Amino acid sequence: MAETEAPRFFGSRVSRVQDDRLLRGHGRYVADIELPRALAAKFVRSYEAHASVGDIDRDEAAEADGVSAVFVGSDFVESEIRCVSSYEGFQISAQPILAVDRVRFAGEAIAMVVADDEYLAEDAAEMVFADLSPLPVVLDLDAALEPSAEVLHDGWADNAYVRRAVKTPGFEAAVSGASHRVTIDLNNARHGAIPMENRACIADYDRGTQRFTLYTTTQIPHLIRAGLALAMDVPENRIRVIAPDVGGGFGVKAQLYTEEVACCLAARELGRPIKWVEDRREHFVAAHHSREHRHRVTGYFDDDGRIIALEADIRVDMGAYSVFPWTATMDNGMAMGILPGPYKIHEYSVTGTPVCTNKTPYGAYRGVARPAACFSIERLVDQIARHRGLDRAEVRRRNLLGPDDYPWHSPSGLVYDSGSLPESLESVLSLGGYEALLTQQVEARAQGRLFGIGIVAFTEQTAHTTQEFKQRGVPIVFGYETAKVRLDASGTAVVSASIHDHGQGLETTLAQIAADRLGLDLEQVRVEYGDTNQVAYGAGTFASRSAVLAGGAVTRAADDVVAILKQVAAHDLEAAIDDIVLETGRLSVKGSPNASVAISEICRLVYQRPERLPKGVESSLEASRTYDAEPGTGAYTNAAHLSTVEVDPMTGKTEVLSYAIVEDCGPMINPMIVEGQIFGGVAQGIGTALFEEFLYDENGQPLSSTFSDYLIPTMTDVPDFAVAHLETPSPFTIGGIKGMGEGGAIAPGAVIASAVEDALSHLGEPVVNELPLTPERVLAYIDEATAPGGPR
Amino acid sequence: MKPPKFAYHAPTTVREAVELLAELGDDVVVLSGGQSLIPMLNLRLANPTDVIDLGGVDGLGDVAARDGGLDVGAMVTHRQMETNDLIASTAPLAQHAAGFIGYRAIRNRGTIGGSIAHADPAAEWPAVVLALDGAITLTSAEETRNVAGDDFFESLFTTAKRPDELVTSVHLAGRFQDNWGFSEFQRRTGDFAAVAVAVGCVITDSSVVEARVALAGVAERPLRCPAAEQALTGPHTGGAAEVAAVARDSFEPVGDSHGSSEYRKRLVFAETHRAVAQALGSDIESIANA
């Protein structure tokens, strides 16, 4: 950065540089890209959840108006998607590109129609007739594990992808010494990310050079390239993946999809670009789902409500296939790891089972398992408070990790680097007006109203790299991100990064970092991403990693470039390199204010006047670096949320009245962007808490395939937010920054459940243990609370 | 989600429109605001040979006073219903109910005639027509006739309208302008009602001399509830809770993913309670355990 000044951009609420283009409709999404001679694809999807596939009659469709080809499973049988975990006993699934002999979820593609346009492709898709013979369906994760359940993959012993168990050595002794215990069962409905832009891709194959170019809506271009190379057995240097503007990802666009492979294979077969733009009904049934966890947790605690040990069984319904690059174990592993959460729990025993069912495969969604883990541990802590007659804030005070506990080695093997949990809790109580709310509750109850307050504290593992992922059994360890910084002859910069910005604001925050490090103005820095030709490798944007890892890589690369600038400037100004100081727009000689040269002049010399360069300096102002935030165990953001709700006693409908957030993600690059991420995450979390649920009938037919059946929160369902920040730097990262992209979405289920339970607590003591809190479920809790003879 | 192929017609008069209807046969749909039809086309739930667009037809967008009530043109939008002064003064129940339909963008395009012809059993307008003793004017190439609201809605998306007829206007009675109530349960603002209740009363000398209680979302068509109307009529004694309990026990709603049958009965109670209380001007009891 300009070394004599405070950073000009880091920490500022600068406007997002991408908004002008996106808000004016000048964004360029996959669907906006028109390639010459492109054909449109439409997938014919299984209407059965589980069936053997007999004859597929494609003759009529193949003859239909404008149709170029109709592909079925046997055409693409050389390719498949496998993602194998290294966990012992992992059972391997192979997902065909188009179903071959068996379909395993309703929505699985069984044929692909390619025609002149989408209308004709959809007309012809209705003419493909597949002979599907229904097989017994497996729809419930517990039923799937019964010995009598139909086993869904050939050669498997049962429907568990894997079974895992972890226990601390002192667990049994701790349990036998505990005076109290409480056990609860918790259920989280299957739902998904639901980005505004559905999936889409265009595959272009150049027969001359035998190269594929895939334009696709993805968060992880380099990993898509790796996955395509594996699935199609094609070297990576023949594949280029471009992710242009992406209209929201949230994890659902962080997997390789069969449709992407199918479009590549069809493009190679036909020698014409193939464009597929998913429609919303397809998205509901075929884009990966998430969040379906079932937990049983037991807390062991003393008279004061201090937790001595935690025991858990975690089952996740991972659907029909293991997904690339995460495998079918990711949610389970994350939940097992993070369940103890923000609490000082030493002893822990956990079993985990990711389960295979006849449902859509399961991928990442903002928060990955942490919403379910937060729901479980926070609901448990509320029950401990109830059991001991303690205020819910007080029981948290007694159990939260304190400032002296870091680095905290959690009983599940995680290393928490830093945090401010008690301070966040106290701040949110004050921000949300907890004491006044307690009075308000007394008044509301006197009027017969059901008014409740929820409080939650949590910790969010972010920017975890090598150490974390090597334990997760994934085939690719997502250890670092890459950034390349290049100054051009006019003195402006291009920053290229392996991450992708689809709402996170990285196009702005990375520019802020680069501008500071390079002594440039924000407008002089252009950030580009989303093309595997730009940088060598990197994992992409997920797991709240991009600001930390790409930010670190940009810092390193920019500093390397500045070192070259200084060499040239020293030569030009006839000074020692160590005396050259970078200032805004200039390089100066320390102590000689008049001896200075513009950065742009040095850039011009490097490229256009090589005779004026010092010996040994090449005509390049470019550096590419990676950053892994060593030791790679992650930077831990923490937060506390407080919300109030009112429940309609006649209908069970829950209204969120207020929502306060205190977030500590370390030093903020751009507080406005941090707040935008928090608000968006909480809004999505309100969907988790109150609305979102993929329902199936008894045959595995999806019942939630339009927006009239699958409800997401709208403006009227999201309250105004109160937000405050703490800034505890990470000792592990450049600048001390921490990730925070997922945090907002983690807590709302837990905090709103806590508030609903509190709203009913004067009537009785039902345990609110299932999400989403539909009005009908809440009414059942009210009935339970008011039933003669009391609850339970 | 691309519609199948169809022929598009854009008449400019009612006469042209009904002649097209007569000429083109049964597999024709009429496009008014398009808020239901366009999604149905895109989802391929509708597969017509022809679409007749009323967007350019003159004379269907007026609101006029008649016989103490109102004649509302079929192409009057939900938003106009929500903002028109004549509707607010003569049929305030209709004005109030309009605000529950979808959200602003939908209300700007959707029309009362389109909603009534579509006859979604959860929609607001059919129930409001029943509560306000409404009548539907149907025009064909041969004739113009009026059908009472009570006789118009037959079943799911099925009405007394013949395929060659067009809904051209809706009459709403004005005598319920002082005592009316409307309440509906939506999961989210703008959603279709799980249950909606519209109540129109005429009260003379502290006695309910006429009561109409109409419900949407409880059956395959909007229904009046005669038992509840009877409970509501007369020198009033029972109150909203009694009428609501009668309504609840009068229906066996079909359950779906938005609520079981049993839950919907609870909603019938809750929303009838609120609508009746509003119509009578009494207070709502705070906790009901019916």
Image (spheres, coloured by chain):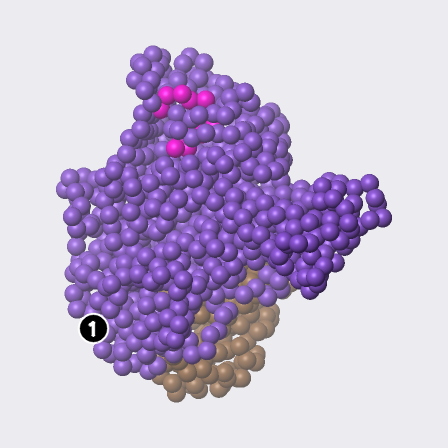
Chain colours: A purple, B brown
Q: Quadrant of the N terminus of chain A?
A: top right
Q: Quadrant of residue B22?
A: bottom left
Q: Is residue A785 above or below residue B248?
A: above
User: In the rendered structure, which segment of residues is drawn in magenta?
Assistant: A337-348
Q: Is A299 drawn above or below residue A210 in the view shown?
A: above
Characterize the magenta stretch by its predominant secondary structure: loop
- Where is residue A436? Give x, y as percent: 61, 27
Please tell me which residue lies in front, A164 or A446.
A164
Which residue is pictured at 31% across the width and 28% down the height? A166
Q: Name the side, left or right, on which A440 lies relative to B233.
A: right
Residue displayed at 27% across by 56% down: A95
What residue sits 29% from the left and 47% below the top? A84
Is A342 contained in the magenta span?
yes
- Looking at the image, can residue A24 be seen? yes
- The residue positioned 44% from the left and 43% from the top of the image is A479
- Give SS at disc 1: strand
Comparing A135 with A529, the one in front is A529
Q: Is residue A287 magenta?
A: no
**Residue with the mark numbered 1:** A57
Query: Which of these two is toward me, A302 or A326?
Result: A326
